[in-house]
């Protein structure tokens, strides 16, 4: 070999040794029995804490004997003349002292020839710790999700179909994972409930526009029972792929819904008669009047007042007076349609809004109510208390307040003309004249 060739070979060897010296992973050349022939500084750094006092790093199998005794068997059982014996074989080394972290090594053993092996050691302690932390968090989240009672949390793919399901969802909605996976958003709604919630496509589109979408409505469990749900659909996305799916949080708030409905009923209902109260009546009447203006529909109003009610209270007592009011309300409720609105106006007065009703039909309805009330009674001891009503009738012309005012004037006229009769508010002028029906 020429001097030039020797210099080049020496340079290549120097470069190789420099590479091994600076290599960030441990590299070891060893014999089949584990005897270490060569190792770089990183390998020494990784193995030195594992060596027994006074034994050094002469034999890899002995150094790793306490934490990975199976490596010797893997090598002796490898039958091929060359090849990979094991790859990234994890060896966990206990912490050398309390309060210090242990080490996890990934060891790759390669058979070079009959009695020559190469070992590559990598410290993967940090990545293993991160993986364990991630798994622990996933387990905690899974435990939280599975333990939730009122919430159902699951995910959808980009097309809006269920791609994850857990025990909390199954507990709330009754569907198993096999039944739910692949189903579209809104599969838990029945035809009756669909009208109360936004269409799934609109919910997903709204979520994409604002990041999330919230609505409430009836959902249906697997057994057919219904529950009132608050549902939030949130977008899952990343910078590269955009929208990758959706998360859905559905909460069973049936009890809250019932409580709110009960409060709403209390706020809109008269406690004695169970009819709507005055405030609720005017809310409905104003809404209906506004719609009637656009549709040119007809509205009629009746005001009823119990005749000589004070005499009933004075003679029989307030308990009987209350019974009379409740019976009066019951008779009126039987005489009107489900589309009409019946309310207690105050004291012994009641008011009725008749939808899509002409004045002639309103007069007929008022007379039917008057006759029905005149035929009923309330038992007080051995006596049946009879009672009658006077009724004023008016149609919507300018406003609800105007119609009620004119009906009230007609009621006053009916009382002036002898009570137990129906009076119609005149449509011309300011309603100071009235036509009366006995």
Image (cartoon, grey):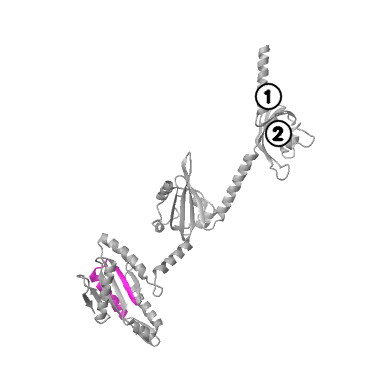
Residue at image mark 2: 45
- Locate residue 427, reporting x and y percent: 21, 70
Q: Check contact, mark 2 vs mark 1: CB within 8 A.
A: no
* Quadrant of the snapshot with the C terminus: bottom left
Task: Determine the secondary structure under disc 2.
Answer: helix
In front: 193, or 396? 396
User: Which residue was labeled with disc 1?
Assistant: 17
Q: What residue is shown at x 65% (from left), y 26% (from top)?
A: 19
Q: Is residue 149 visible?
A: yes
Please tell me whether residue 360 belongs to the stretch shown in magenta: yes
How many numbered discs sit on the rendered protein?
2
Residue 72 in view here: no
Task: Residue 339: name its quadrant.
Answer: bottom left
Residue at the (59%, 50%) spot, across then down = 140
How far across and how far down the image is residue 257, in percent? 45, 62
Cα–Cα span, label 2 and label 1: 17 Å
Give neighbour class at mark 2: few <14, some 14-19, many 20+ (Cα, 10 Å): few
- As rendered, which of 111 and 340 lies closer to the eye? 340
Q: What are the residue bounds of the magenta stretch?
A: 348-374
Residue 398 location, quadrant? bottom left
Quadrant that contains the N terminus: top right
């Amino acid at each position: 070999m020429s001097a030039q060739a020797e210099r080049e070979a020496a340079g290549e060897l120097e470069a190789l040794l420099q590479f091994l010296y600076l290599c960030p992973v441990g590299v070891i050349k060893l014999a089949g029995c584990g005897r270490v022939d060569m190792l770089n500084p990183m390998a020494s750094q990784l193995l030195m804490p594992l060596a027994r006092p006074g034994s050094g790093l002469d034999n890899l199998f002995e150094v790793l004997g306490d934490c990975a005794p199976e490596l010797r068997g893997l090598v002796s059982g490898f039958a091929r003349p060359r090849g990979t014996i094991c790859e990234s074989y994890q060896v966990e080394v206990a912490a050398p002292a309390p309060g210090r972290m242990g080490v996890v090594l990934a060891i790759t053993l390669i058979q070079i020839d009959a009695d020559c092996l190469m070992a590559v050691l990598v410290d993967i302690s940090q990545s293993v710790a991160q993986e364990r932390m991630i798994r622990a968090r996933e387990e905690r989240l899974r435990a939280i999700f599975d333990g939730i009672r009122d919430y159902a949390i699951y995910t959808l793919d980009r097309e809006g179909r269920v791609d994850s399901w857990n025990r909390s969802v199954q507990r709330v909605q009754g569907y198993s994972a096999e039944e739910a996976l692949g189903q579209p958003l809104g599969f838990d709604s029945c035809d009756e409930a669909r009208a109360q919630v936004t269409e799934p496509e609109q919910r997903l589109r709204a979520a994409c526009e604002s990041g999330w979408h919230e609505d409430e409505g009836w959902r249906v469990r697997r057994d057919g029972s219904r529950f009132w749900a608050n549902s939030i659909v949130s977008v899952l996305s990343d910078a590269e792929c955009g929208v990758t799916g959706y998360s859905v949080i559905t909460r069973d708030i049936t009890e809250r819904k019932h409580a709110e409905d009960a409060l709403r009923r209390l706020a809109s209902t008269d406690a004695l008669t169970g009819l709507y109260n005055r405030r609720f009546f005017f809310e409905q009447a104003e809404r209906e009047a506004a719609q009637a203006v656009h549709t040119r529909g007809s509205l009629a109003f009746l005001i009823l007042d119990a005749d000589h009610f004070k005499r009933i209270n004075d003679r029989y007592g307030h308990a009987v007076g209350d019974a009379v009011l409740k019976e009066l309300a019951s008779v009126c409720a039987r005489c009107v349609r489900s589309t009409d609105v019946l309310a207690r106006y105050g004291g012994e007065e009641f008011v009725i809004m008749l939808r899509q009703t002409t004045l002639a039909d309103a007069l007929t309805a008022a007379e039917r109510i008057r006759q029905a009330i005149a035929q009923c009674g309330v038992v007080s001891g051995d006596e049946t208390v009879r009672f009658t009503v006077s009724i004023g009738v008016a149609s919507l012309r300018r406003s609800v307040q105007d119609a009620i005012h004119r009906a009230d004037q007609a009621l006053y006229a009916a009382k002036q003309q002898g009570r137990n009769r129906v009076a119609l508010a005149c449509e011309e002028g300011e309603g100071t004249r009235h036509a009366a029906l006995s």
